[in-house]
Image (cartoon, rainbow, N blue to C red):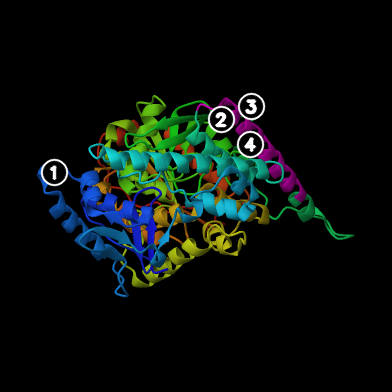
């Protein structure tokens, strides 16, 4: 179909795959949604009574709204909006509704569906039905909207419960996101919390078994040969990279942002507070024992109270938020700091989290003691203005929409190769699965597009806290020279360190990782004098891990 109307979450209309600008009038948008769903012809008098009071010239208001709706749905191939002097209807045979497969689904119907069908239905829920179209002064419409929303809410609960039950035994890691979606809908369900704990433990055990099997397979040498380590690190570096002897535990908490999004955050370790600004593709539980992030968490928790949180749209946080703007991401960082009861923190920014950290340090300098920025950028790919890069990224965005949620990991492997090209097979497999487990295809594409227009260059002159910037020399995503040029705009005491591996994410098998951890500890003992005045400084570019 060339016309698609999405009623779950905020009302959205797509014509030939492109989002259509909707009228600013809330009643006009509500009328469009109502006509799309009821299908049968509606008398003009009834629509006037439903949406407009008599002193408002209801017939004139209805005519104006219908003219605006016609502009939205017109495909130039026949009448989709059909109206005469007495009645109005939308010809729904020429459009697709996102809730069409969900209507009328009973408990038995849901039980009879295949797992792939259930997962597709679960992905359709981008939010509650017509979440942005509450009209308290139109009681008949509001009663209809709430009743439909409640019916769909029950359907969603049933779909998620069936998915969790089916996946719990064979694939607990895949069941976890659905269980957390359920918990977000039913936060007081104690039995569900217990189920999530069991699923988390089962997922960890499964990951440990797979990890052990992978190591065993890769360490078996042919007869007569000896398996040797591919890299030998100095003794000091090995000590820095070793996990702490104390068994770490993380405490996962939740908070609500001013715009109503639910965020999950975790605390681990003891010491000065270090907050990792969120970036996409994170999951507090899955990364705790992961082969990609475990060494980061353990190393940092040995020196700090580490606070991590899942970005809105990711992991254990609200999976389908209405607002995914950069401003919302920066506000979320402040919400986490407030929820954790912290007054002054150091910030760790990785990838997109660097821009979030810079924006927060520029806007709230009194709360930020220092920053470590790794593999980040100050301008998104559209703002950088490189037409070749924009063309590549747009193609990548199209692939995200088509291939992100598929069972075949070939597409996700493309992203993994960009971010951690030097990873082991175990690390690559985990990162491939993380992409599907932590964020839906639609949210992934929205975050990808929002990241394209980030621009914090104007905030750099306001950043005056000690800052350590580290960046991979051959970063395939953000060139090193671009980072060097951007940081020249900040008057802060900034140390730029290049890192030899070609990677956006340091993994534990790389030589630079222990040295990276050693550099981060500088935040515990900052040069107090450097924080009180502007310094002119030469760029330092010692390559960590280079020979």
Whichever of labels 3 and 1 marks the residue nearer the N terminus, that label is 1
Residue 454 visible here? no
The residue pinned by badge 3 equals: 246
Provide residue 419's location: percent of width, then percent of height. Answer: 52, 57
Q: Is residue 200 magenta?
A: yes
Q: CA distance from mark 2 to mark 4?
A: 13 Å
Residue density around tag 1, few if under 14, some if 14–19, many if 20 or more, within 10 Å: few
Q: Describe the element under mark 4 as helix, strand or loop.
A: helix
* Image mark for residue 250: 2
Q: Nearer the viewer, mark 1 or mark 2?
A: 1
The residue pinned by badge 1 equals: 54
Q: Nearer the viewer, mark 2 or mark 4?
A: 4
Left or right position of 427 against 10: right
Q: CA distance from mark 3 to mark 1?
A: 72 Å
> What residue occupies the far bottom of the structure in this picture?
77
Q: Nearer the viewer, mark 3 or mark 1?
A: 1
Q: Is residue 368 above or below residue 190?
A: below
The residue pinned by badge 4 equals: 200
Q: CA distance from mark 1 to mark 2?
A: 59 Å
Residue interval drawn in magenta: 188-213
Q: Describe the element under mark 3 as helix, strand or loop.
A: loop
């Amino acid at each position: 179909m060339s016309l698609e109307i999405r009623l779950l979450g905020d009302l959205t209309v797509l014509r030939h795959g492109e989002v259509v600008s909707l009228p600013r009038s809330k009643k006009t948008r509500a009328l469009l949604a109502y006509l799309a769903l009821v299908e049968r012809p509606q008398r003009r008098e009834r629509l006037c009574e439903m949406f407009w009071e008599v002193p408002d010239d209801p017939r004139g208001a209805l005519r104006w709204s219908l003219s605006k709706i016609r502009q939205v749905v017109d495909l130039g191939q026949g009448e989709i909006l059909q109206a005469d002097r007495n009645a109005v209807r939308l010809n729904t045979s020429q459009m697709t509704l996102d809730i069409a497969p969900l209507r009328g689904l009973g408990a038995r119907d849901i039980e009879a569906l295949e797992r792939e069908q259930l997962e597709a239905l679960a992905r359709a829920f981008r939010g509650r039905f017509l979440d942005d179209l509450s009209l308290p002064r139109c009681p008949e419409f509001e009663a209809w909207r709430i009743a439909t929303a409640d019916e769909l809410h029950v359907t969603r609960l049933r779909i998620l419960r069936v998915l969790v039950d089916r996946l719990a035994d064979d694939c607990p890691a895949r069941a976890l996101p659905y269980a957390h979606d359920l918990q977000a809908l039913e936060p007081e369900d104690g039995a569900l919390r217990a189920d999530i704990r069991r699923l988390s433990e089962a997922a960890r055990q499964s990951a440990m078994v797979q990890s052990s099997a992978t190591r065993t397979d890769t360490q078996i040498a042919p007869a007569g040969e000896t398996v040797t380590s591919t890299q030998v690190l100095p003794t000091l570096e090995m000590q820095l990279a070793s996990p702490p002897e104390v068994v770490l535990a993380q405490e996962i908490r939740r908070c609500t942002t001013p715009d109503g999004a639910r965020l999950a955050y975790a605390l681990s370790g003891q010491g000065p507070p270090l907050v990792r600004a969120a970036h996409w593709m994170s999951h507090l539980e899955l990364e705790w024992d992961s082969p990609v992030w475990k060494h980061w968490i353990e190393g940092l928790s040995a020196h700090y109270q580490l606070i991590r949180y899942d970005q809105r749209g990711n992991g254990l946080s609200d999976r389908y938020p209405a607002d995914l703007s950069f401003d919302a991401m920066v506000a979320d960082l402040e919400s986490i700091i407030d929820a954790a009861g912290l007054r002054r923190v150091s910030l760790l920014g990785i990838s997109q989290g660097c821009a979030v950290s810079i924006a927060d340090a520029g806007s709230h300098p009194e709360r930020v003691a220092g920053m470590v920025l790794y593999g980040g950028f100050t301008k998104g790919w559209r703002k950088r203005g490189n037409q070749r890069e924009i063309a590549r990224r747009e193609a990548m965005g199209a692939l995200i929409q088509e291939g992100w949620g598929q069972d075949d990991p070939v597409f996700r492997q493309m992203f993994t190769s960009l971010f951690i090209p030097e990873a082991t097979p175990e690390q690559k497999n985990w990162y491939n699965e993380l992409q599907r487990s932590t964020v839906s295809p639609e949210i992934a594409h929205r975050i990808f597009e929002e990241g394209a227009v980030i621009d914090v260059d104007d905030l750099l002159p306001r950043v005056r806290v000690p800052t350590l910037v580290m960046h991979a020399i051959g970063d395939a995503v953000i060139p090193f020279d671009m980072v060097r040029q951007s940081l020249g705009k900040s008057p802060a005491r900034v140390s730029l360190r290049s890192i030899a591996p070609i990677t956006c994410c340091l993994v534990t098998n790389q030589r630079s990782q222990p040295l990276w951890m050693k550099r981060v500890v500088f935040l515990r003992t900052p040069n107090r004098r450097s924080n009180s005045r502007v310094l002119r400084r030469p760029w330092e570019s010692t390559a960590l891990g280079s020979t």
